[in-house]
Each structure stands twice: as structure tokens, then as C-alpha cells.
Amino acid sequence: ATGLVGGAQNFNGSTAYISLPNNSSSLRTNIFTVEAWINLNAQHEWQYAFSAGDAGLDRSIIDFGEVEYPAGTKRFGGCIWPNAGIEGPADAGTYAGQWHQLVYVLDAGNNKSYVYENGVQTAVGTGVLPGQADRFAIGAKFKGGDYMDGVLDEVRICGTPRSSNWVWACYLN
């Protein structure tokens, strides 16, 4: 698929996703940043750009993407289960056919998590990971399901909590 910068990965909303290796050490800590450019083909009730979970307990630990909460209200957001969920504003502009930069930052050192859209912080929450994630996915829930219907480009996962200035600079570039 054509991305914002060169090629990108198209997800069909029904079966396509990328499963990351279980040794993704950047995500096994309480300090990391996930950033991506997303262009939805259509809005759905729930669709995830990124998810991590505990296969043994069969539960999500982190979900990040388009959520519908409360019912009928679409927004970008992230959840750390079962401790906390943070969602961006209801008018976050999750319109199909437009590129959006989405960033999720977990900073356990400050007991904070942040959601950014298009370089601007839209939500802040508290909480740290409640367990050890051992399965990771891009474009769906960690074990499949809640598939993304759209295009992802420039996905970055790093083992440091990026600053708001870093997020803004990435958005401008």
C-alpha cells in the first residue's frame, strides 16, 4: 500500500495483522513508546493499531487504537488492563481516509501514560503494566480479532518514554 512515507502495510479489517516475536524486549518493561501513522479505511467499534497480552492468562495488557467508549463515541485511545484506560477526546478526528499520527507512551517512572494525536497530547492516565506481556500484535488484538481496517506506516516501538517535544518533532517531519 502507499504510505505517508513510501510503502506501508494495509490491513483488511478481518484477518490481516502482524504478530511480533515474544522476545520483543522493548515492550516487556513499564517504559516504552509506540508510534505510528494510521489511515483508516472505515470506522469500526473497536480496531487496534497495537496490542500486547498475556497468552497464559488469555488477557490483554495493552490495547491501543480506535475505541468506541462510551457506546457511539469514537476516539483514539489506549488501555492498560485492568489498571487504567485512557482515551483521547471524542472529537479526536478519527475520520476515514485521513492520515493521523498516533503515539502511546508508558512511563512507569512517573506512573503516567499518554496518548498523542498529530503531535498533541490528548489524554493522560496513571498505571503500570499489571503483568508480563508475551504476545504482541500490530493491526489487531494480540491474539487476533478487533482487526484494523486501514493502512499503518512508520511504526516505531522503543524502550524509552519519548517526550512531548519528540512526538511533536516526529509529527512535523
Image (cartoon, rainbow, N blue to C red):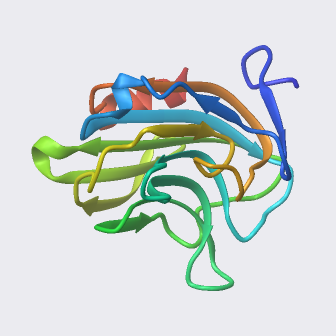
Quadrant where the C terminus sits is: top right
Q: Can you name the residue that lies furthest to the bottom here?
A: 71
On screen, 50 above or below 141?
above
Count of numbered marks: 0
The answer to which quarter of the image holds residue 1 is top right
Q: Can you name the residue that lies furthest to the front here?
A: 56
Residue shown at 69% from the left, 42% from the top: 139
Viewer-closest of 150 and 138: 138
Horizontally, residue 64 falls left or right of residue 158, namely: right
On screen, 5 above or below 112?
above
Percent position of residue 17, x then y:
73, 38
Viewer-closest of 80 and 144: 144
Q: Can you name the residue that lies furthest to the left here?
A: 109
On screen, 160 above or below 42?
above
Horizontally, residue 48 falls left or right of residue 165, namely: right
Percent position of residue 73, x then y:
63, 79
Viewer-closest of 24 and 95: 24
Percent position of residue 52, x then y:
48, 45
Residue shown at 17% from the left, 45% from the top: 108
Horizontally, residue 7 falls left or right of residue 121, namely: right
Residue shown at 60% from the left, 66% from the top: 67
The answer to which quarter of the image holds residue 151 is top right
Percent position of residue 88, x then y:
48, 64
